Image (cartoon, rainbow, N blue to C red):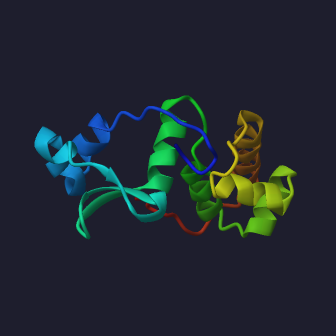
Amino acid sequence: MFASCTTGTINLRDWIKNTKALARLADPKLFSKARVGEHGASVVFIDDELDLGADNLRNLEAEQSGGIGHERMIEWMLRNDLTQQRAADAIGISRRMLNYYLSAEKPIPKTVWLACIGWEGSQTKRGHTGKRSAVMA
C-alpha cells in the first residue's frame, strides 16, 4: 500500500533482468527475504545494501497499470529546463496540483500528460529545446 492509500501489483521481472544493481534479486531465496523498510519508505532485501524505494515502486506501478508515473513528469520538466512554476504555467495547472503529481500523491491525469506533450511539441516547433536531461533510478 502506498501513501496515497492505493495498492497495486508490480512486475519486477524486467526491472531485475535489465538493471545490473538488481540482478541478485533473480535469486528466489534472496527475493523471498523482502520486507518493508523503516517508515514504509522502501522494500529491503539486504540491510544498507539492497532495497527498492517506495517512490520508484509507485512510479513503476503507475506505468505498468497504464497510468503516467511521476518520474515521467519530472523527466519532462528537466528535459525542458522548467521550474515548478514555469511547468505549472505551461500546462495550465496550479503549482500545488503540480506538486501533488510530482510527489505521486495524486495520479497524473492523461489530459495533463497530453498537455505536457503538446507544450513540448509547440516549443520544439518554435526552435526552443530543453537544456538538461535526467536519468531516473
Image-quadrant location for residue 53 = bottom left
The reply to whether residue 136 is visible in this rendering is no
Residue visible at 76% across and 42% down? 112
Quarter the C terminus occupies: bottom left
Q: Is residue 81 above or below residue 16?
A: below
Q: Give the residue at x 76% y 60%.
A: 87
Count of marks placed on residues: 0
Q: Would you say 47 lies left or right of 3 here?
A: left
State the residue in front, 8 or 24: 8
Estimate the x, y position of residue 121 in percent, counting from the top left. 71, 46
Residue at the location (49% across, 64% down)?
134
Q: Nearer the viewer, residue 18 or 50?
A: 50
Where in the figure is residue 135, as x and y percent of width and height?
43, 61
| Residue 121 shows up from this direction | yes
* Residue 86 vertical position relative to residue 112 in the rendered view, above or below: below
Q: Position of residue 18 (x, y in %)?
A: 25, 44
In the rendered image, the residue lying farthest to the top is 66
In the visual, does 88 lie left or right of 42? Answer: right
